Image (cartoon, grey):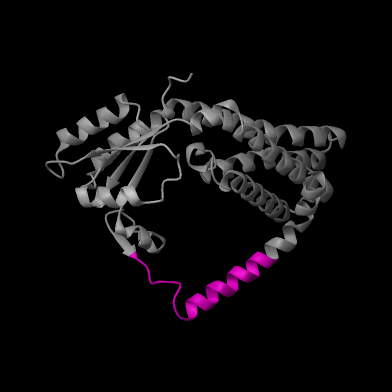
């Protein structure tokens, strides 16, 4: 396996991460429902609904993991987000289940739900800890991460100094300069090169931002294997204020929300919501600490 590229090893690690999370989320719930004697009695509609709502917990947990880029292993492996994102997904799942049960006016066992959440959090974190120190993870961390960088000489120099790529200590950047900014033949040649050369990704500077059909070709590569695409642009600082209009032909730049009174309101809301979240999650945190 040592001769395989970083992209191939990262792809295998991502598949194993998805499988590990799925088992770590589903198995604790099945065990808890079994020991709490939750058998589906089709003669009781209330029991069927109760079990059905509880069975939504792992599905929602996995859904929030997938939508929050929690399986982008090559990005998250070396950071605390590798453990933080599953916890956030569990919090979202619990809030969603509680809100749904309240809306349909179907009471669910708080002890059972709390037991499921606590056990699942411990299970997922432990499984990820083991996976992070597995042979496959160590092999991936020791691989050279190769990127093709499409940029001018000045932009390439800035990219090399950037600390925004926490992928690996062994990063290899291959510089490419286009003779013509929107030359389809040159872009197609680059797409073929990144795919056949087993590159881990592509970094595109603002000066050479491609046309939509070229982006579609790059997206096709992303859909087939682990392949990261980064855009190097001064507009990155404005992204939180971007809003796409209906036909996606224009981007509206919203008013800044972190100046003047908006900054005070934002800080106040951050504190209030953090306190509320801490109060709600404190039983789970306590049980998790005891379990660990």
Q: Please report the residue visible at 68 percent of the width from the left and 55 percent of the height from the top.
A: 99
Q: Main secondary structure of the magenta part?
A: helix
Quarter occupied by residue 41: top right
Q: Is residue 62 one of those drawn in magenta?
A: no
> Does 220 sit above or below residue 164?
above
Q: Is residue 42 visible?
A: no
Point out residue 155 in the picture as x, y percentages from the top left corner: 25, 51
In this orientation, which residue lies closer to the viewer: 233 or 156? Answer: 156
> Does 67 sit above or below residue 254?
above
Point out residue 196 in the picture as x, y percentages from the top left corner: 30, 24
Q: Is residue 272 one of those drawn in magenta?
A: yes
Q: Residue furthest bottom?
A: 261
Point out residue 49 in the picture as x, y percentages from the top left corner: 76, 41
> Does 234 sit above or below residue 255?
above
> Does 168 sit above or below residue 261?
above
Report the span colored magenta.
253-275
Quarter occupied by residue 124: top right
In this orientation, which residue lies closer to the viewer: 59 or 188? Answer: 188
- On screen, residue 274 versus residue 168, left or right, reads right
Point out residue 194 in the picture as x, y percentages from the top left corner: 30, 30
Q: Please report the residue visible at 59 percent of the width from the left and 71 percent of the height from the top.
A: 269
Q: Please report the residue visible at 20 percent of the width from the left and 36 percent of the height from the top.
A: 187
């Amino acid at each position: 396996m040592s001769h395989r590229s970083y992209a191939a090893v990262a792809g295998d690690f991502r598949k194993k991460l998805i499988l590990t999370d799925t088992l770590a989320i589903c198995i604790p719930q099945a065990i808890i429902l079994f020991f709490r004697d939750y058998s589906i009695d089709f003669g009781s509609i209330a029991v069927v609904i109760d079990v059905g709502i509880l069975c939504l917990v792992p599905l929602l947990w996995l859904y929030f993991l997938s939508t929050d880029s929690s399986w982008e292993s090559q990005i998250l492996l070396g950071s605390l987000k590798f453990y933080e994102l599953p916890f956030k997904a569990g919090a979202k799942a619990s809030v969603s289940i509680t809100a749904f049960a309240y809306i349909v006016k179907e009471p669910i066992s708080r002890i059972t739900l709390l037991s499921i959440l606590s056990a699942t959090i411990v299970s997922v974190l432990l499984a990820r800890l083991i996976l992070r120190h597995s042979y496959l993870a160590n092999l991936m961390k020791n691989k050279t991460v190769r990127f093709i960088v499409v940029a001018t000489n000045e932009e390439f120099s800035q990219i090399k100094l950037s600390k925004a790529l926490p992928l690996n200590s062994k990063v290899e950047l291959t510089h490419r300069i286009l003779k013509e900014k929107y030359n389809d033949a040159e872009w197609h040649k680059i797409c073929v090169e990144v795919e056949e050369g087993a590159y881990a990704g592509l970094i595109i500077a603002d000066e050479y931002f491609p046309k939509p059909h070229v982006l579609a070709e790059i997206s096709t590569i992303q859909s087939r294997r682990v392949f990261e695409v980064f855009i190097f642009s001064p507009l990155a600082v404005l992204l939180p204020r971007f809003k796409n209009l209906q036909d996606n032909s224009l981007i509206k730049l919203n008013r800044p929300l972190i100046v003047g009174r908006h900054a005070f309101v934002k800080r106040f809301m951050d504190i209030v919501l953090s306190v509320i979240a801490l109060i709600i999650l404190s039983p789970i945190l306590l049980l998790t600490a005891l379990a660990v």
